[in-house]
Image (cartoon, rainbow, N blue to C red):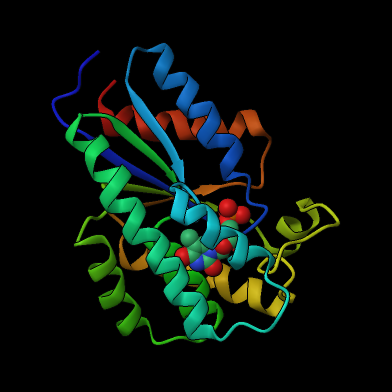
Amino acid sequence: MELKKGYFITFEGADGCGKTTQIELLNNFLNQKGIETLMTLEPGATDLGKNLRQILLHYEKPVSDEAEMFMYLADRAQHAQMIIKPALDEKKVVLCDRYIDSTVAYQGYGRDGNIEQINILNKIATKGLKSDLTLLFDVESEIAQNRLGKTKDRLESQGMEFHKKVRNGYLELAKQNPQRIKVINANRTIDEVFLNVKNVIGEFLNI
Ligand code: TMP
């Protein structure tokens, strides 16, 4: 089934919200319907990004907030221009695990960064490429943290206060962008959440 144009759908939420499972389920579902997709992620979809991901998640020495932010932005610039934009030009449905809202939620709300500046830098990194639809998987921070395994990466092992700020930041973003961001209650079974995802996507893509 060829679509009239490409669609850019992003998946957001705190660590442990279950979005990665849902993106995989949705990718299979759309492919079964004959819709061409590109399933991708940030950070780490490009070769350059894989190197940045390794540093971002596993570097053991202190990382300044700005260095962290610029690495996420560098990953995004490479990803948006080399992978996402070409796939959209080929009329694919791009399913992206994290995008610009992650930087606003984590480096902005989570680390008390300057959100106005982050918005400008996101725009520069992506050359203005925005998602058409964003699914925000929302779950209480305690539940999300319990879902994570014992070995946590650099970001996952920030304290509970950080994760609560990230969650509230996401909810604030959803409030500010009700048309683009759809909040999904992720404190349910995988099947229940996926039913919700299918309804939102079905309506959005008209399928
Ligand atoms: P992942 O585990 O969902 O792949 O994401 C990697 C981690 O990076 C996750 O803890 C969220 C964090 N992150 C940011 O802090 N800022 C960003 O811009 C992105 C894309 C991810």
198 shown above or below 13: above
Between residue 135 and residue 85, name the one nearer to us. Answer: 85
Q: Position of residue 43 (x, y in %)?
A: 50, 56
- Can the viewer see residue 4? yes
Between residue 35 and residue 154, name the one nearer to us. Answer: 154
The quadrant in which the N terminus is found is top left
Q: Which residue ends up furthest to the right in the rendered image? A: 150
- Residue at point 20%, 17% (across, down): 2
- Residue at point 34%, 12% (across, down): 34
Quadrant of the image occupied by residue 20 = top right
In the picture, measured across the screen, residue 172 lies left or right of residue 9, that is: right
In the picture, measured across the screen, residue 128 lies left or right of residue 15, that is: left
14 shown above or below 5: below
In the picture, measured across the screen, residue 39 lies left or right of residue 15, that is: left
Q: Position of residue 207 (x, y in %)?
A: 29, 20
Q: Position of residue 97 (x, y in %)?
A: 48, 47
In the rendered picture of this protein, how many numbered marks are placed on residues?
Answer: 0
In the picture, measured across the screen, residue 132 lies left or right of residue 134, that is: left
- Residue at point 61%, 36% (across, down): 21
10 shown above or below 125: above
